[in-house]
Amino acid sequence: MIFEIINPSDPYTMEADDFEVACVANVFLGEGAYGLRQIDGDDNKMPILLFGANKWFIETFGTEFELVLKRCLEEKKDYLVKTLNSVLIGNASDRKIFYDGLSLIDDAQKQQEWRNKWHNQHRSSVNDIAALAHHYASVLKETAAKDGSDQAE
């Protein structure tokens, strides 16, 4: 599933296999200040949750945010890491262009250079949502490795 991260700065998208994980990742990134909207398939949406996150999480997932977060960290950490690593500046059509270009590059270092160049050319705001997402993914991956559960990607 591809999601638009609704925020006041540059357009960002992310990919997630699980709506619950997408919502937790989105809360990590915006502390409740960003909405989320699935742009392919289902009509999954997460509103801005500055006031009343628990109510929305209970209505949507059957339990409060802290328990959803705990479940994601304990049972779905690999999906959470993958979702955070998928955050990319740009809308859905930009995302397709980015990945079309990335697929032409075989070398991992050159792929990272392409990612950095893309990001730097498209970012106009000091609010760097993708860098924050990738940082959190790295931290989660490190904690998974320390815990002996280095299945996170």
Image: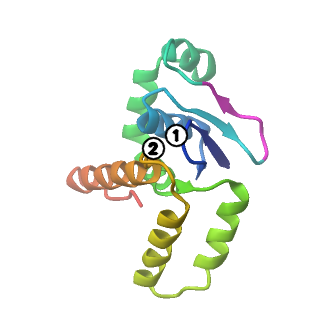
Q: Is residue 46 magenta?
A: yes
Kindly identify which numbered label has been placed on residue 106. none
Mark 2 is surrounded, within 10 Å at the Cα level, by few (under 14), some (14 to 19) or many (20 or more) other residues, namely some
The structure residue drawn at horizontal position 38% and vertical position 58%, both measured from the top left corner, is: 151
Q: Residues within 10 Å of mark 1 (few under 14, many from 20)?
A: many
CA separation, marks 1 and 2? 8 Å
Tell me if label 1 and label 2 are in contact, CB under 8 Å.
yes
Amino acid under disc 2: Lys
Q: Is residue 106 left or right of residue 72?
A: right
Taking 92 as reference, is 76 above or below it?
A: above
Residue 13 point in image, percent of width and height: 60, 50
SS at mark 1? helix
Residue 57: give x, y in percent of width and height.
55, 20
What is the span of residues highlighted in magenta in the rendered image? 41-47
Q: Look at the numbered disc 2 and give the secondary structure of its residue.
A: loop
Residue at the (68%, 37%) spot, across then down: 37
Q: In the rendered image of this protein, does residue 137 appear above or below residue 7?
A: below
* Lateral position of residue 136 relative to residue 127, left or right: left
Q: Which residue is mark 1?
A: 21
Q: Which residue is mark 2?
A: 76
Chief secondary structure of the magenta span?
loop
Q: Nearer the viewer, residue 147 or 102?
A: 102
Which quarter of the figure is the C terminus placed in? bottom left
Asked if the magenta segment contains residue 45, the reply would be: yes
What residue is shown at x 54% (from left), y 42% (from top)? Answer: 9
